[in-house]
Image (tube, helix red, strand yellow):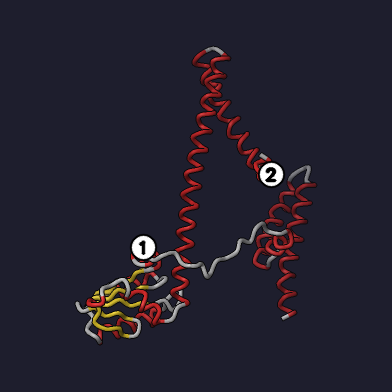
Amino acid sequence: MRNFIKNLKFSSVIDFLFFNLTLFLIFFAWTRFIFKNVLIALIITFALIIAINLIKNIRMHIKSSKNTTLKIKSSEMENCLLLLIAQSNQEKIDLFSSFYEKNDIEFVLDNIIVFKDNSGLAINFSHKNESQENFLRIVYKARQNNIKKLSILCYSMNKQDKIFFENLTDIEVKILEKEEVYTKFLIKLPKKENYFNIKSTGKIKFKQFISLSIDRRKAKGYFLSGLLIFFCSLIVKYNIYYVIMSSILFLLALLSFRKNETLTIQK
């Protein structure tokens, strides 16, 4: 109970009250109009509100559970892919060779596993975003070795480059990015230690909030907002609030502009 009260946010309470008050007014107006009895109208209204809140909480719980599961799976996938980038070429070859029968593999050519049916599997996890030049070398090498069908595994690739390679003639190229690689291969592996787990940053501190708020990129926005409110202060009769807000925004614009200027001088 104490934890519930401690974690309870004022904004959540306001949202809850507003939502239910709105529902009450809608339902009570209609039930009273239909049944012509205040007591019956109140009973039906509260019953409907309770039912809606129960359904809402169940849906939120299901959604939260799904999001948690997806987050865990996404974290596991990312860890597996980052491990591939960190591993040596031989480790990658050994890993993906283990998914096939030894009799099916003809030979290994650098980072390409060549199969007896003239197909190949290129393991290309040197970077997160692979360059077109690197893929050109892989495809060229595959063509030289009479590979007719080539699958290239990578973390991610530019969509236009992917279309280019998958529409080449004389060789059939299929590019598998991280989601497909994980689903087809890595999900079968036992769960490994998370080498690249990021610690939770927790709540943002006031000093960090100020640092994020005062930035040269935001100076223009602060200035234009202040200018708009300043002109409003010339029109509105009781303009003290507009004067205060425009002054604050102009001050933030100055601080944001000066902050990066100071950093540039220090460098």
Q: Amino acid at mark 2?
A: Lys
**Residue drawn 22% across and 84% down?**
146
Q: SS of the residue at dot 1?
A: helix
**Could you tell me residue 50's position as x and y percent?**
54, 28
- Which corner quadrant holds the N terminus? top right
Query: Relative to the observer, which residue lies in front, 31 or 115?
Result: 115
**Could you tell me residue 170's position as x and y percent?**
21, 79
Q: SS of the residue at dot 2?
A: helix
* Residue 21, quarter of picture: top right
**Could you tell me residue 171's position as x and y percent?**
23, 78
Q: Is residue 213 above or below residue 166?
A: above
Q: Amino acid at mark 1?
A: Thr
Residue found at the far top of this picture:
36
Which sits earlier in the primary sequence, circle 1 or circle 2? 2
**Residue drawn 63% across and 34% down?**
17
Q: Is residue 219 above or below residue 26?
A: below
Query: Relative to the observer, which residue lies in front, 21 or 259?
Result: 21
* Residue 111, quarter of picture: bottom left
Q: CA distance from mark 1 to mark 2?
A: 41 Å
Q: Is residue 67 visible?
A: yes
- How crowded pointer 2 is (Cα within 10 Å; few <14, some 14-19, many 20+) is rated as few
Report which residue position mark 1 lands on: 183
Q: Is residue 171 visible?
A: no
Report which residue position mark 2 lands on: 6
In the picture provided, is 74 more to the left or to the right than 153?
right
